Image (cartoon, grey):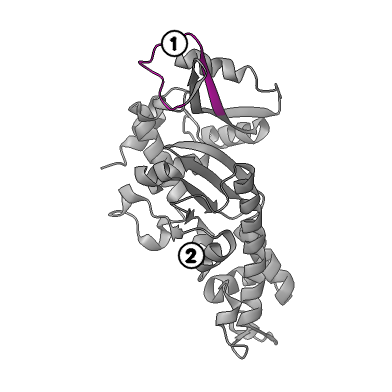
Amino acid sequence: DVRRAIAAAETFIPKNPNKEVLHIIPRDFKVDNESGIKDPIGMNGVRLEVDTLVVECSSHFLKNIFKCVEAAGVGISDYVFSAIAAAESVLSKRQKELGVMLLDIGGGTANFVVYEEGVPIHAGVLPFGGNHITNDIAIGFRTAVDIAEEIKLKYGSCLPMELAKKEVIKLSDFIPGEEGSYSKRELAEIIEARLCDIFELIQKELKRIDRVSLLPAGIVLIGGSARTPGIIELIKRELKLPAEIGVPRDFADVVEESVSTILASPLGVISWANNNGSGKNDDFIFRSRAASSLKKWLQSFLP
């Protein structure tokens, strides 16, 4: 009955040949108009309804990923939204129950998923990431993108008021013979401005689901930009929520902490494949390209 209700929910999704449904996730059930039910199995009733979260992506984008992976000689048995996969290895059960957002600031995009009472209630992708910060630095410092990336990694910060005006970055340290210098505070102002743009969009997403400043477990940050000095303080200031750096829990013994936030998504895929293969995720995610070879291969990496 539950699966039939969820399948019926899919029929209400507007048909779009350019979109592929990744997940249909039940957020809430109603049994005979009684709402607030997370698991209706075992209950008696006449009418079963479900409120679902639908996660879609571009069909063209998904097909290109399939082509690339299969061209590398690897078979595909399933797919998952990266933020949901990362949540498998980073978020605790308690965080998911209380209410939490996992935010993955990568190179080209910022992916997020919001959990409450153990299930995802909202998810999305923002078209900004670490590469946009690098591009801003390249424009502001009038230098090459590769040099801007080096400057960001070595001197980057997003709290300009904590830096002295006299502290400077010499371009000659990165390009021999190049004249010119810029203040570290100016660099931090560029980084802060772009990150504030991202957090402003995140705030709008929280407003859409009436969760502004209402996530007790706060924001858990992963991705390459998560290691930017001062980013946790900036999140707390801009979003008025607790914040912390996310670390994949099941891989602490095999992955260095300095790179674990960058690898959170691929490590999450391993956790997802392991859990989905054992049926642990079947309670709330029913759309899946069922499985075999890839899941067994991923499971071989787990202790």
Q: Is residue 41 magenta?
A: yes
Q: In this image, 297 relative to 131: left or right? A: left
Q: Given this view, does label 2 or label 1 mark the residue nearer the observer?
A: 1
Q: In front here: 17 or 120? A: 120
- For marks 2 and 1, the one nearer the N-term is 1
* Percent x, y of residue 278: 32, 27
Among the 4 quarters of the image, the one containing residue 186: bottom right
Using the image, determine if residue 282 lies above or below residue 161.
above
**Residue 45 circle label:** 1
Disc 2 crowd, CA 10 A, few/some/many (<14, 14-19, 20+): some
> What residue type is disc 1 on?
Gly
Image location (x, y in percent) of residue 79 = 50, 32
**In this rendering, is residue 11 above or below 231?**
above
> For the point 51% across and 70% down, which residue is it?
230
Q: Is residue 220 above or below residue 43?
A: below
Residue at position x 58%, y 19% in the image: 9
- At label 1, counting other C-alpha atoms closer than 10 Å, the crowd grade (few under 14, some 14-19, many 20 or more) is few
- The one of 72 and 164 positioned closer to us in this rendering: 164
The residues colored magenta run 36-52
Query: Within the image, what quadrant is residue 170 found in?
Result: bottom right
Secondary structure, mark 2, is helix
Q: Which residue is mark 2?
A: 227
